[in-house]
Image (cartoon, grey):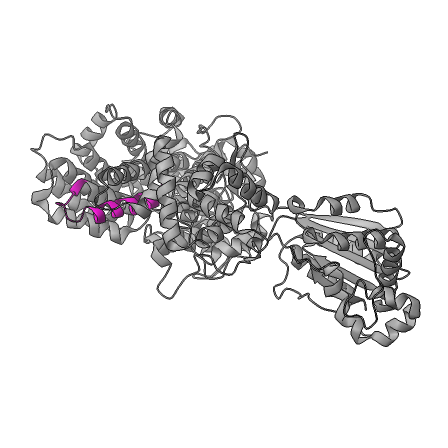
């Protein structure tokens, strides 16, 4: 008999299994010890965790050793007794009837037909209480398995075993208690939360004569999960998918179907984080069999819950589904039994198992029914005085031009979401403007839309929206014009069009000079232009304004002015100057930090320039994570470039290259920082010893942004604890440099010319040359390249971890 005889109903996955090293070691152990009797292998995990693929690996490896295989997938509610044994054995037993009949004999052949209806024999009648006949039938199945086994053995696979019928469970229990006289491996894959109690009892009472192994498939590590993302996604989309998938490879592949690049780019500019919010996208390439076993009542409640969104409660579900309490309880019982929804802590609230299952449930409802369901959900939420943002998720779907209260709530929600969820704010502002199209133009709302577009990294749309407003000068109040000028200049600065931004700010300052408004925001944009490379000149007027803004009554303007003063190095930056900045920033709440992302970036940059590279790396990482979690895309490239520079200083060119590539991917989406990516990428490649322009893609690319989960962390001062960059570590030759000399050495390593350093540090060109001479003498070197090299190796990776407080 060939090793692939008696195979039915099971397909080895075409994709190779990714990761799962520990689980594969158990599979290898099973293969190595199989052949000496009966073995039970349980593969346990949540839906879409890869159980079927691991079964395929086990089958593949045993077949290579000459084993025969038989397999089936249990079907929920099939109504056929012994379904998995019928599917796995019936056809093949019938095809090899002569050999099976010889093995069983005439007496037993009749009993087999009561289990396998395809067997060519008159079945013996077997009542439920007839234990003798049942034993004979089960014994006949055991003899069939002995017949099917090759000299090596037989692998019997039962996938989705949590759906096994009662008769199949009884037969499995018999085979475990009375194992066939042949090498046999019975491999079951099942979902633990859907496991039938009868099967659970059987599996927990396996007799000693049967060897058993249990493989638990938990969440997949991020680095393995990232390898499953579509090849067309860049690093940023890949990381976001990994985070949303929560370790589940099937969920990742389902979500990826909504963001796979099309010919014209990503559809609708949808940021991946928006997959979790509001109306879910249609997802393809995911199995739809989870809803097959459900009754119409349970399906109704699944659709209603999907409209409500996570989390939901029973009272809300009852109202949206338009059922009574008893029907709601019955529907929810089914959804919980089949692991469609799960409890969300205490308080009687529930959530969907994952994002994919909610999308499937949502789109299972017809359009007109969903429309009414959103209305009903909205009515309940209004009675409960829910927040504007909670209401907006339904209002954007059902609000009409005559619903003034609803449109006003959408506007309120948009204003609240500008910094914490700009993607939502964009949709809600656009809906409001569409519904108010018959009314006069609303410049303030359009300005807010322009801000939200910029924060979401949609620079071209932001500029177009804001410039259109500026062209309608007669309609703008001075206050709205000031805000529009500030954000329009900011968009140009972030895109590297510094001259345009500077001209726009100067024009605005001249135009609004007599308006009586506080023009500090425009002056701070000039300061940011002066701090951004290539540096712009710092005028006396700007110096004076920054001094006044440092004590501004607005805490955000006060913070921004102080970090920009430090970034401009108008004074020698030391711990003494940085400490108040850190204290001021640390006093902000998590929500307020999202309104001060630009200041957060400059704070991290100032810490980096001070030489406290460990603290700088943490700040850049925390800022990037906070921005990413909030959907603020506009600073991805500058923050990633800051991390790349910091990794160079920490002597880690591999991660420097990774973050330079991350910045490159951000540039392709936002155009932000485009002028600086090639420079930093080239520097990282040079440190790695690669030729210029080498397309290096390190395998160690991070699957997650460091610190991506959790609330904002307290800012750590450079010099506190175990941190303080290379000067507080065993940095070797660089330890002889003064604070200012170390600053200049770092700027040299970044490729700055003497003129650029003089402008950035507010020093004369000759003073910079004097510092360089001192550096050359102290370090006993003769070239700028040697300075760059020493800065790069000053903190070796093991030292860097200690300096950063990780050891």
The answer to whether residue 259 is seen in the rendering is: yes
Residue 527 x %, y %: 24, 37
Q: Is residue 639 left or right of residue 150?
A: left
Above or below 356: residue 13? below
Q: Is residue 668 left or right of residue 318?
A: left
State the residue at coordinates (27%, 27%): 558
Is the C terminus in the top left, top right, bottom left or bottom right quadrant?
Answer: top right
Residue 84 x %, y %: 73, 60
Is the N terminus in the top left, top right, bottom left or bottom right quadrant?
Answer: bottom right
- Is 425 contained in the magenta span? yes
Residue 489 x %, y %: 21, 45
Query: Which of the pair 370/705 is nearer the observer?
Result: 370
- Is 771 contained in the magenta span? no
- Predominant SS of the magenta segment: helix
State the residue at coordinates (20%, 31%): 543
The magenta stretch is 421-444
Query: Which of the pair 563/209 is nearer the observer?
Result: 209
State the residue at coordinates (87%, 52%): 131
Query: Which of the pair 294/70 is nearer the observer?
Result: 294
Above or below 185: residue 558? above
């Amino acid at each position: 008999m060939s090793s692939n005889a008696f195979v039915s109903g099971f397909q080895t996955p075409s994709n190779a299994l990714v990761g799962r090293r520990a689980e594969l070691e158990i599979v290898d152990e099973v293969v190595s010890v199989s052949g000496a009797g009966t073995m039970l292998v349980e593969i346990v995990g949540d839906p879409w965790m890869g159980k079927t693929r691991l079964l395929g690996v086990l089958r593949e490896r045993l077949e290579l050793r000459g084993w025969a295989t038989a397999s089936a997938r249990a079907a929920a509610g099939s109504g056929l007794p012994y379904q998995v044994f019928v599917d796995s054995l019936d056809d093949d037993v019938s095809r090899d009837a002569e050999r099976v009949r010889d093995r069983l004999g005439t007496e037993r052949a009749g009993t087999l037909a009561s289990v396998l209806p395809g067997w060519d024999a008159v079945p013996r009648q077997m009542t439920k209480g007839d234990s003798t006949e049942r034993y004979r039938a089960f014994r006949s199945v055991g003899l069939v398995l002995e017949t099917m086994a090759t000299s090596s053995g037989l692998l019997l696979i039962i996938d989705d075993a949590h759906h096994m019928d009662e008769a199949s469970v009884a037969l499995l229990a018999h085979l475990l208690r009375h194992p066939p006289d042949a090498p046999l491996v019975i491999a079951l894959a099942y979902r633990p939360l859907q496991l039938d109690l009868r099967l659970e009892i059987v599996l927990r009472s396996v007799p000693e004569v049967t060897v058993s192994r249990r493989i638990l498939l938990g969440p997949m590590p991020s680095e393995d999960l990232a390898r499953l993302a579509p090849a067309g996604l860049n690093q940023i989309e890949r990381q976001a998918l990994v985070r949303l998938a929560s370790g589940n490879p099937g969920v990742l592949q389902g979500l990826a179907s909504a963001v796979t690049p099309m010919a014209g780019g990503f559809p609708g500019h949808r940021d991946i984080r928006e997959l979790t919010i509001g109306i879910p996208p249609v997802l393809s390439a995911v199995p739809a069999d989870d809803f097959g076993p459900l009754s119409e009542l349970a399906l109704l409640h699944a659709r209603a819950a999907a409209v409500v969104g996570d989390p939901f409660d029973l009272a809300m579900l009852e109202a949206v589904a338009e059922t009574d309490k008893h029907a709601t309880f019955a529907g929810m019982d089914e959804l919980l039994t089949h692991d469609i929804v799960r409890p969300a802590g205490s308080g009687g609230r529930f959530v969907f198992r994952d994002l994919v299952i909610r999308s499937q449930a949502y789109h299972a409802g017809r359009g007109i029914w969903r429309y009414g369901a959103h209305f009903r959900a909205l009515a309940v939420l209004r009675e409960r005085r829910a927040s504007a943002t909670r209401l907006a998720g339904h209002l954007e779907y059902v609000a009409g031009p005559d619903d003034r209260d609803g449109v006003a709530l959408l506007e309120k929600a948009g204003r609240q979401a500008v910094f914490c969820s700009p993607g939502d704010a964009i949709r809600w502002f656009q809906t409001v403007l569409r519904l108010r199209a018959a009314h006069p133009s609303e410049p303030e709302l359009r300005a807010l839309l322009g801000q939200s577009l910029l924060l979401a990294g949609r620079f071209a749309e932001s500029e177009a929206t804001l410039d259109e407003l500026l062209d309608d000068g007669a309609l703008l109040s001075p206050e709205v014009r000031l805000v529009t000028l500030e954000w329009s200049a900011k968009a140009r600065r972030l895109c590297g069009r510094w001259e345009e931004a500077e001209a726009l700010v100067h024009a605005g300052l001249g135009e609004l000079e007599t308006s009586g408004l506080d023009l500090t925001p425009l002056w701070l944009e000039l300061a940011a232009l002066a701090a951004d490379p290539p540096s712009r000149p710092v005028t006396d007027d700007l110096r004076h304004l920054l001094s006044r803004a440092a004590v501004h009554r607005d805490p955000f303007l006060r913070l921004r002015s102080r970090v920009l003063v430090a970034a401009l190095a108008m004074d020698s930056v030391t711990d003494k100057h940085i400490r108040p900045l850190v204290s001021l920033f640390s006093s902000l709440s998590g929500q307020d930090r999202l309104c001060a992302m630009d200041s957060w970036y400059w704070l991290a940059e100032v810490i980096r320039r001070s030489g406290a590279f460990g603290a700088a790396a943490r700040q850049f990482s925390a800022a990037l994570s906070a921005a990413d979690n909030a959907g603020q895309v506009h600073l991805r490239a500058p923050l990633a470039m800051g991390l790349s520079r910091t990794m160079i200083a920490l002597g880690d060119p591999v991660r420097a290259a990774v973050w330079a590539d991350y910045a490159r991917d951000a540039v392709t989406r936002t155009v932000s920082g485009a002028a600086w990516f090639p420079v930093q990428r080239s520097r990282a490649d040079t440190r790695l010893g690669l030729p210029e322009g080498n397309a290096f893609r390190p395998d160690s690319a991070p699957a997650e942004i460091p610190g991506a989960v959790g609330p904002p962390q307290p800012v750590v001062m450079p010099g506190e604890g175990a941190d303080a960059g290379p000067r507080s570590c065993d940095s070797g030759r660089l330890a002889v440099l003064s604070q200012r000399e170390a600053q200049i050495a770092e700027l040299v390593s970044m490729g700055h010319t003497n003129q650029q350093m003089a402008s950035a540090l507010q020093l004369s060109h000759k003073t910079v040359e004097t510092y360089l001479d001192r550096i050359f003498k102290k370090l006993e070197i003769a070239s700028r390249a040697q300075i760059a090299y020493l800065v790069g190796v000053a903190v070796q990776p093991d030292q860097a971890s200690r300096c950063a407080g990780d050891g």
